[in-house]
Image (cartoon, helix red, strand yellow):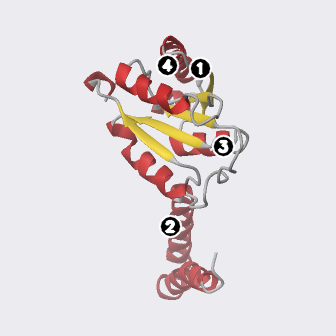
Amino acid sequence: MAPWKLPLLVGAIAVPTIAAFYVGGPGVGVAVGALVAVAIVAAAVRARPDEAIGEPAVAGSDRRLLVVTACEVEDQEVIGRIAAEAAASEGQAPAEVLVLAPARIGFLDRWASDLEPARRAAQQNLVITVASLAKAGVAAEARVGDEDLVQAVEDVVSTYRATEVILVTAAAEREAAAELEGRLRVPLLRLSLSDPAAR
């Protein structure tokens, strides 16, 4: 945080609360203070980091491809593009491939702390995607990640030094895709699923 922002933040917290105590007495002051606290918590929860994700690829290092998808990928055109990216080229060995699927947790499941259905659905997506890649001659590992697509990529890239990320998107992931484009330090290739049912 920039040094000049801290006094502004303190002022934004203190001034309304003090003014409310002065004008309306203790009851109004406490109520306004509580509202300010709730607003701060809400802003903190909604705030997203903007740091860069991953490390730039080093020339001559092994190629590592991270394929990120929130749904199963069987589309032959998309699988073909992934296989082409993973294939050996210019004296380099084929890329190591990891497929990542975020575990999409429903509202009620989150409140009930029931994560198992979301993990099973993500694992099923991974099985179908990895099997489709295997048919195209691409050996891939698979991993279930955080429900937030960007957070899932950030978590995996911290240990799996990807040299390229392929994001297979449906319409719902546009915002996450745009954020990844801005934050990733490695090349990002976006592929859209042509199957309307996946959207």
Pointer 1 or 2: first along the chain = 2
Relative image position of residue 151 (x, y in whole percent): 58, 44
From this view, report whether residue 11 is shown above or below residue 160.
Answer: below
Question: Which quadrant is the N terminus positioned in?
Answer: bottom right
Relative image position of residue 191 (x, y in whole percent): 39, 36
Report which residue position mark 1 lands on: 116
Relative image position of residue 71 (x, y in whole percent): 44, 25
Please, what is the three-letter code of the amino acid marked with disc 4?
Thr
Cα separation between marks 4 and 2 = 47 Å
State the image quarter where residue 95 is shown.
top right
Please tell me which residue lies in front, 124 or 189: 189
Report which residue position mark 2 lands on: 35
User: In the rendered structure, are the residues bearing label 1 and label 3 in contact, judged by CB atoms less than 8 Å apart?
Assistant: no
Pointer 1 or 3: first along the chain = 1
Question: Most extreme residue toward the front, as rendered?
Answer: 91
Cα separation between marks 3 and 2 = 38 Å
Please, what is the three-letter code of the amino acid marked with disc 3?
Val
Question: Which quadrant is the C terminus positioned in?
Answer: top left
Please, what is the three-letter code of the amino acid marked with disc 1?
Glu
Q: Nearer the viewer, mark 4 or mark 2?
A: 4
Pointer 3 or 2: first along the chain = 2
Secondary structure type for disc 4 = helix
Report which residue position mark 3 lands on: 157
Please, what is the three-letter code of the amino acid marked with disc 2?
Leu
Report which residue position mark 4 lands on: 129
Please tell me which residue lies in front, 190 or 70: 190
Relative image position of residue 126 (x, y in whole percent): 54, 20
Pointer 1 or 4: first along the chain = 1
Please tell me which residue lies in front, 129 or 118: 129
